[in-house]
Amino acid sequence: MTRSFTQPVTASESANTAIDLKSPGWRVVAVQECRDLWVSARGLLLVFVYSVLLSAITYLAATNQILNFLEQREAVNLTLQVSVAIGVLVVLVVSADAISGERERGTLESLLLTPVSRRGIAAGKVAAAMSLWFAAWLVSVPYVWILGRGVRIVGEALLLSLLVGTLLGLGLSAVGILISAASTSNKVSLSASLFLLLALFAPSQLPTATTHAGFSEVLLRLNPIASVLHYMSAVLARGHGWTADWSYLVSALALVVLAGGALIVTAPRTIRLAGGVSGG
Amino acid sequence: MTRLPLLTGLILGFAVSAALSASAAVAAPPLSDGIDIVLDQKRLDIVVGDKFGVRSEITNRGTVPSDRFVAHLNIASLERDVYVDPEDWSTSRSAVVAPLNAGGSTSLTWDLQSVNAGSFDVYVVLLPVGPSSAGSGPVVVSSTPLHVTVAGRRTLTAGGSLPVVLAVPAVLGFGLAATRWRIRRAA
C-alpha cells in the first residue's frame, strides 16, 4: 500500500473514499491495496508473465512429440498444476512484500495511523493478495478450455483448481504476511518466502515410486503443496471421485487454520514500524 | 595278491559311483523346469496414451516345488526406428513370485500406458532368485508375447491452441502497456 491515508485525494476519488470509510476496516484496506496493485500495473505485469508461461506450457503440450503422448486429461492436469503452483507463488510474493515492503517504502506509518485494527490490516492484505490468485485463475480458463475440450473435464478441472488454489493461496498468503511482519528487511522476507516455497515444491518433483513408500507418503501428506497437487492428479488424471482422496487436502486446510490463526493472534504485536520478532 | 583285485574293484566302484552321482547332479532337473507363463491376451490395437493391463498366469507344471522367482515385464519395439523405454510404459515392472507347489499357480497384473506409436511385443520373464538358484537360470519366458499395435493420435494441435496461446498474453500485454502509458501521462 503505497498511498498514504492522509495523502490528499483527487475530487474523483473522494466519493469512493467516503463510501469506503463506512465499510469494515479490512475492506477499506483490501480495496486500497487492490487499487494499488492493479492501477499501478504491478498486478497486471505479474499476470502477464503468468500468461506467457501458461502459453508456453499449453503450446508444448499441444505440439511437442514427447509431451503429446499425454492423454488430454493429463495435459489438462499438467497445465492446471503449473497454473496453481505459479498462481500461489505470485500470491506468496505479494504477501511477503505486504508489511516489510511498506516499512522500506516508508508508508507503513501512515497505514498504522488509520483507524483500522492490525488484524484488519492483515485481513485486507490477504484479500488483496488473493485478488491476484483469482485473476490468475481467470487467465487459466481459456488454456484449460483449449486443452480439455472434447473430454468433458473443463468444468470439473476449473472448479477443482479454484477450490485447491484458493485454499493454498489463503494459507500461503497468511504465511507470507507472518514472514513479512517478522522480517527485518523486505529482502529477507522475499528470500525466506521463496525458499519456503521451493522446499515445499521439491517433494512434488520426486519420482512417483518414491512418494508411495512409507515415510515418503507421510511427508507427502504433511506437505500442503505436494499433497494438493497429488489430489488434483488423482481427480483429473486418474479419474478418482472428489471425495476418494479428500484426506490429501487436510494439510492445506491445516495450513489455512494454523497460519490464519497465528496471523490473527500475532498481528497486533508483529505489524509495527520496527521489523524482527523481538523489536518493540 | 588276492587283495589287489578287491582293492582295485573297490576303488573303481567308488570312482564309478562318484562319477555317476556327479553326472546325476549335472543332469538334475533345474528348479524352473515345468514352469510356464501365459499372458491373458495375444493382440491389442490401441492408440498413443491409452492405458491397458495384461495379466500373466504363472503355473508350476512340474512335480517338485519351484524356487522363488522375480517376474520382470519387458517391452520390445519391433520397428527399427522406434525407440522404446519400458520405464515410460510402466512404473512397476518387477515382482517377486513366491515358491509354487507342484501344480500350483499364481497371477500377476501389469499396468501399462502406451507412450510410442508403432509395433511392440510385451512379454514376461522369470528369473530364479532362491539362495542356490540365483544367477543359475534358466530364465523362463512367457510362451507367447502380447503383440501391441499403437496408432498415433494428435488430439492437441498447434493450430488449435495457437489463437489462445497468442491472444491471452497479447490482450494482457496491451492492457499492461495502456496502464503504464496512462500512469506516465498522469505523472
Image: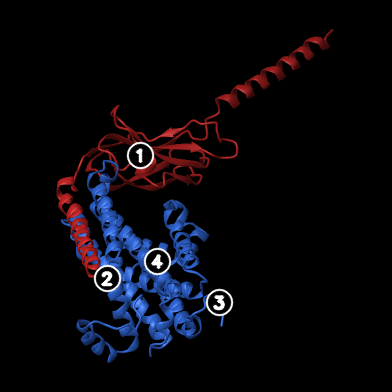
Q: Chain of mark 1?
A: B
Q: CA distance from mark 4 to mark 2?
A: 15 Å
Badge nearest the viewer, 2 or 3: 2
Depth check, front residue: B136 or B80: B80
Q: Earlier in the sequence, mark 4 or mark 2?
A: 2
Which residue is identified by label 3?
Answer: A277
Q: Horizontal and vertical percent for residue B80?
A: 30, 27
Q: Quadrant of the C terminus of chain B?
A: bottom left
Occupied quadrant, residue B142: top left
Amino acid type at circle 1 is: Val
The residues bearing labels 2 and 3 have C-alpha atoms spaced at a distance of: 31 Å
* Residue at 51%, 72% in the rendered image: A183
The hue used for chain B is red
Give the labeled residue for mark 2. A38
Residue receiving disc 4: A93
Asked if B41 appears above or below A13 in the picture, the reply is above
Nearer-N-terminus badge (2/3): 2
Q: Which residue is mark 1?
A: B38
Query: Is A249 rendered above or below residue B39?
Result: below
CA distance separating discs 3 and 1: 68 Å
Q: Nearer the viewer, mark 3 or mark 1?
A: 3
Colour blue belongs to chain: A
Identified by mark 3, the residue type is Val
What subunit carries mark 4? A
Regarding mark 2 in the picture, which secondary structure is present there?
A: helix
